[in-house]
């Protein structure tokens, strides 16, 4: 899964092209970019664009993943992702650095 606030994801990135074509690739994005992004990614196997209202709320995103049976998540990202996750003790149960 990936998160985008701008919706500027290329169809050619390895996230969409590498690995097993049968894997579901979830893309969480704000409602304002969801329709355009879904149209741009249309036809890519296993891609599901998930609209998340005005902003991507991590608690709602994690609830969505939990409902899909995903109980563990390796978070790799920039400052925004790490700040949001580590500032909310209810979202993170375990941290490990390399």
Image (spheres, helix red, strand yellow):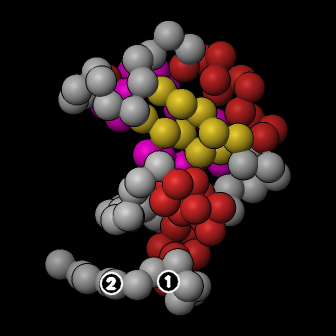
Compare residues 6 and 26 and report the one nearer the observer. 26
36 in magenta: no
* Secondary structure at numbered mark 2: loop
Q: Where is residue 95 in the image (x, y as percent from the top left)?
A: 32, 84
Give the label on residue 95, or none. Answer: 2
Callout 2 environment at 10 Å: few (<14), some (14 to 19), or many (20+)?
A: few
Callout 1 environment at 10 Å: few (<14), some (14 to 19), or many (20+)?
A: some
Q: Decide: marks 2, 1 in contact (CB < 8 A)?
A: yes
Residue ID at (58%, 75%):
84
Q: Earlier in the sequence, mark 2 or mark 1?
A: 1
Q: In this view, does 96 lie above or below 18?
A: below
Residue ID at (52%, 78%):
91
Specify whether 97 is left or right of 51.
left
Q: In which quarter of the image is residue 35?
A: top right
Compare residues 74 and 78 and report the one nearer the observer. 74
Residue ID at (54%, 62%):
62
Specify whether 57 is left or right of 49.
right
From the image, tell me which residue sits under label 1.
86
Residue ID at (47%, 49%):
68
Specify whether 61 is left or right of 43.
right
In which quadrant will I find the C terminus?
bottom left
Which region is colored magenta?
Answer: 1-16
* Secondary structure at numbered mark 1: helix
């Amino acid at each position: 899964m990936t998160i985008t606030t701008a919706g500027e994801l290329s169809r050619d990135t390895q996230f969409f092209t590498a690995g097993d074509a049968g894997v579901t690739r979830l893309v969480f994005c704000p409602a304002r970019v969801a329709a355009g992004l879904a149209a741009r990614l249309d036809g890519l196997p296993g891609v599901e664009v998930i609209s998340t209202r005005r902003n991507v709320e991590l608690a709602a995103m994690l609830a969505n993943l939990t409902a899909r049976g995903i109980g563990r998540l390796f978070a790799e990202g920039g400052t925004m992702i790490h700040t949001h996750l580590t500032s909310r003790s209810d979202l993170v149960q375990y941290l490990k650095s390399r």
